[in-house]
Image (cartoon, rainbow, N blue to C red):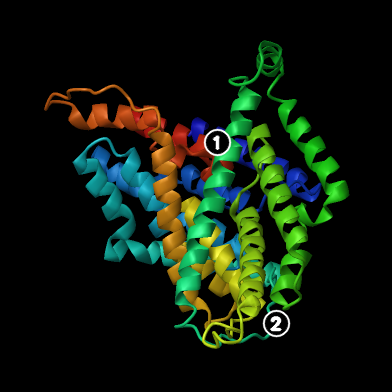
Amino acid sequence: IGERIRSLIDSMRKSAASAFTLGTGCSLGPEGPCVEIGMSVSRSLMDTSPNRLKQKADRIEWNHRLLSCGAAAGVAAGFNAPIAGVFFALEVLQDAFDSSSPNEYDAATANKAVTGTARIAPILTASVCSALVAASILGDHSVFHLASYSLRTPLVELPLYILLGFISGGVAFSFSRLARFFQAAFDGDIGGKWFKKLAKKTPKSLKPIVGGLFCGVVGIFYPQVRFFGAETQNALLSNNSLPNLMLLSLLSVKMIATAFSVASGLVGGTFAPCLFLGSMTGALFHNSVTFVSESIPPQYAALSGLALADLPAYCMIGAASVLAALFRAPLTASLLLFEMTRDYDVILPLMVSAGFGSVVGDILDNKSKRVRKPRKLVLPLAGVAQQFERIKERTGLRRDRDHVSWGDLADPWEEEQEKEGKQ
């Protein structure tokens, strides 16, 4: 019980740190702390499991169910999106449960804990209750404000939506690689001898200060990339276009600022920054396709002046695609945008683009992790699963320990898995 209380206290400290991080405008999002609070409350309830759960498998199933309820409640409260919260638990946490299970029996138990028909009800209840409580306190706290727009030829534009998904997957991959680069720099793993020595000697408590100073300097020149910079996205969603150079600048600066913030140890999430990156990507894509379409000679009437969907549609599709590519969660991303904008018309092209973005991000990420292939190992039949788990650890295949997509949740999740293994 003492460990659970300490874990809850640490979570409250981290929540306070996130309030300062986001309140000062650092380039991160609120969903990481919200999910962490939900999961911390779940951890504090793990010791209240019924007496009948004497088997280890039953206890793990109970713990996974509680963690899923807490995560779903966190997303529902943070974004006023209870449906996306449920799918976050089913889609994102399920992958973490499967990857953390050392053998087939535990993997089946983890899957049963989250996707069993009778076990989805607690996740639904937790998500709905969390959203209702947040709405009763904060009111209608919708972040995005969508203007009227039209989808003129969705079937004709389908190849464009697929192409946008491919581009979004590349954007998410670039952000992931950049964050890992900055993380290696802060850890002292790259650079000259003097830089490595300086980075390793710098106390961990000072590194977030460096991240905050960096975000402050960047915010002077580009205030749009700060945490409370939704005005730029709302301008695009209101069908107010921006020049391509400005969009490209905001995309690059936001990616650098967010990656630097994550690597420095600032507390926050990457959901909201992904939505910003995706909105800029979608707007750039829309402007580029419009320019190309208008530049086609009149004799090619079928292609000249193609009736594209309005700018807000492409911004929403890009936002969902980048988010889906980073988290490998196309359904969560699609439903999150649907709930945040409360618009159903764009859901079909949005799901197509998010699906392709997720696949492209997964392919690029896996290929980059296998550039340095591990030595061939001949695995004996006994202990195959355990050795495969160690290979996954070494080659970086554990999604739940990815600080880029999981952000500040990666460390608490790792600690929880280690505690379960010792029980």
Q: Residue at x 32, y 27 (%)?
A: 390
Q: Within 10 angstroms of label 1, few (less than 14), some, or many (20 or more) residues?
A: some
Marks 1/2 in contact by CB < 8 Å: the verdict is no
Give the numbered dot on residue 147: 2
Q: Residue at x 65, y 79 (%)?
A: 294
SS at badge 2: loop
Tell me the quarter of the image containing the C terminus.
Answer: top left
Q: Earlier in the sequence, mark 1 or mark 2?
A: 1
Q: Residue at x 17, y 25 (%)?
A: 379
Q: Residue at x 79, y 50 (%)?
A: 23
Relative placement, left or right, of 377 versus 342 is left
Q: Within 10 angstroms of label 2, few (less than 14), some, or many (20 or more) residues?
A: some
Could one spot residue 316 in this view of the protein?
yes
- Position in image of residue 56 (x %, y %): 26, 38
What's the CA distance linking mark 1 and mark 2? Answer: 44 Å
- Position in image of residue 400 (x %, y %): 44, 41
Give the numbered dot on residue 7: 1
- Position in image of residue 161 (x %, y %): 49, 71
Identify the amino acid type marked 2. Ala
- Position in image of residue 399 (x %, y %): 42, 42
